Structures are given as structure tokens and as C-alpha cells.
Image: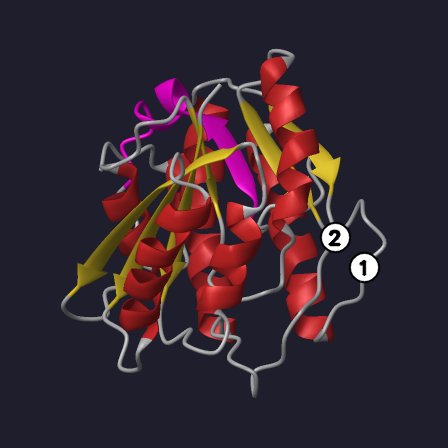
């Protein structure tokens, strides 16, 4: 089973090389698709350098480098990456070091056992959280998802969302920014696909270190969950 990893990145020069190196050491990863979302630093240059260097040590690993000319948002970067996926299964990896790619193994195992969508839960793992507002905001989004869509998940806004590509192609995602997470959750639920969770590790960074999500993104996430539940838009 071929696993493709989409890495949306915006101004991640300090961490992008390290996270790509960690990804390259996970044997289950067959394809890495990095989408530089109009970075103003040298993120894209570092990705290109890594792409050339990895050919010497792991030639079978495909590293695709894409770039938006302007900053469009995480959701737009993920959708660009999805257009290039060739694997049977895809997952998302942020360009920082908050999440550990070694957790892919237990997530992929669930896919191999028959699940179609697997979320990595920071709540089920024993993890620390950088800000109380992010923690409780995430719990609220999980609660709303469960109430609105009849789910039973603990960590709706987790970055680690793994799914079979035949499911992803049916979602018709339209997201541009951080609403990727609630849009995917809502549309997966509407397809009646069950979301399985596994515990993962989490090492949060601070806003000073580059954390980008803001309170306004939480409001957008709530609206997205409500929108797809009650108005059932086609776009």
C-alpha cells in the first residue's frame, strides 16, 4: 500500500529540512508532496535541496516540490497537493516539528485492516498543550462534530488525518485556509465513512516559534461544521 504525504508549508525555513528528513526515514512513506504556499523565506529552496539530496540515499522515495506564487492558505495548499497524489493512501504533515511521522505506522495499520479514514488523536495520547485556548477550542470542535454528525472522536482539528484516496476524491474539497479540517470531517461523515482514532504524540510550538492558527480560525471552523450540517451546500 503506497502512502503519500502532503506537506503544506509557509515560512517554515527553520524546520522544513528536519521534518522532511524525518519523513524520509519512515519506510512506509513512498511519496512526499511539498506545497510551498508563497513563503517569503527560503523554505522552497530548502525543499529543492532536500529533493536532490534524498535521491542519493533513498532513490525510491519520490519528493515533489510545488509552489504557490502567493500565500493562499493551508487548505489551498493541501488541495494542490491532492491533485498530484499517486498513492493509495494520503496523510497531512505540517512543516513544523509538532507531530511525529513515526505515528504513521499505527495509523496505516488501521487502513490495512479495513478502515478508510484514520485520525491521530493528541487527546488519546499523553501530551502537553501550549495554550489552554487551543486545547479547549479543539475539544469544542470535537464535541460539535460528534453532536452534529453522530461521530465519536476526541480530536477533530488534528493535523494527522489519513485516508484512502478513493474516499478523498469523493469529498470535493473547496477549502482555502484552516477550514480544511472541519470540511474534511463534515464531508467524510456525510459519506457515512467511519473515522477511527489512534493515539499520537504531540510537541506543540508557541506563537513566537511560528504557530500560525488564530482565534478567528476557530470561529471559521465552527461555521464550517454548521454550514455542512444544516445547509448541505454542494460547493
34 drawn magenta: no
Count of number-bearing discs: 2
Across and down, in percent, residue 66 comes to 22, 54
Identify which residue is drawn at 49% across, 37% down.
Answer: 185
Q: For mark 1, what is the residue? A: 127
Residue behind mark 2: 201
Q: Position of residue 177 (x, y in %)?
A: 34, 60
Q: Please state the horizontal and vertical placement of residue 164, each as a whole percent of the image.
A: 45, 23
**Tag 2 near tag 1, CB within 8 Å:** yes
SS assignment at label 1: loop
Q: Secondary structure at mark 2?
A: loop
In this rendering, position of residue 47 left or right of residue 205 = left
- Which of the numbered marks, if any, corresponds to residue 160? none
**Closer to the camera, 161 or 227?**
161
Among the 4 quarters of the image, the one containing residue 62 = top left
Tell me if mark 2 has few (under 14), some (14-19) or many (20+) residues whose alpha carbon lies within 10 angstroms of its own. Answer: many
Q: From where the camera sits, is residue 123 visible?
A: yes
Q: Is residue 29 above or below residue 127?
A: above
Mark 2 vs 1, N-terminal side: 1
**Screen quadrant of the C terminus:** top left
Residues rendered magenta in the picture: 159-173
Amino acid at each position: 500500500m503506497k502512502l503519500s504525504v502532503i506537506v503544506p508549508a509557509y515560512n517554515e525555513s527553520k524546520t522544513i529540512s528536519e521534518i522532511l528528513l524525518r519523513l524520509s526515514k519512515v519506510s512506509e512513506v513512498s511519496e512526499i508532496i511539498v506545497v510551498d504556499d508563497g513563503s517569503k523565506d527560503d523554505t522552497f529552496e530548502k525543499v529543492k535541496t532536500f529533493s536532490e539530496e534524498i535521491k542519493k540515499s533513498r532513490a525510491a522515495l519520490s519528493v515533489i516540490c510545488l509552489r504557490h506564487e502567493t500565500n493562499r492558505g493551508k487548505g489551498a495548499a493541501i488541495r494542490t497537493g491532492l491533485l498530484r497524489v499517486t498513492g493509495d493512501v494520503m496523510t497531512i504533515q505540517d512543516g513544523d516539528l509538532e507531530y511525529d511521522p513515526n505515528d504513521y505506522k499505527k495509523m496505516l495499520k488501521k487502513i490495512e485492516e479495513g478502515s478508510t479514514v484514520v485520525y491521530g488523536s493528541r487527546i488519546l495520547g499523553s501530551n502537553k498543550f501550549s495554550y489552554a485556548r487551543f486545547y479547549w477550542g479543539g475539544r469544542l470542535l470535537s464535541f460539535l462534530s460528534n453532536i452534529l454528525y453522530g461521530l465519536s472522536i476526541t480530536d477533530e482539528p488534528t493535523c494527522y488525518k489519513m485516508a484512502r484516496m478513493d474516499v478523498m476524491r469523493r469529498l470535493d474539497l473547496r477549502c482555502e485556509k484552516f477550514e480544511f479540517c472541519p470540511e474534511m470531517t463534515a464531508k467524510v461523515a456525510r459519506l457515512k465513512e467511519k473515522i477511527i482514532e489512534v493515539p499520537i504524540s504531540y510537541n506543540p510550538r508557541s506563537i513566537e516559534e511560528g504557530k500560525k492558527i488564530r482565534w478567528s480560525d476557530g470561529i471559521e471552523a465552527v461555521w464550517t461544521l454548521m454550514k455542512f450540517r444544516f445547509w448541505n451546500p454542494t460547493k
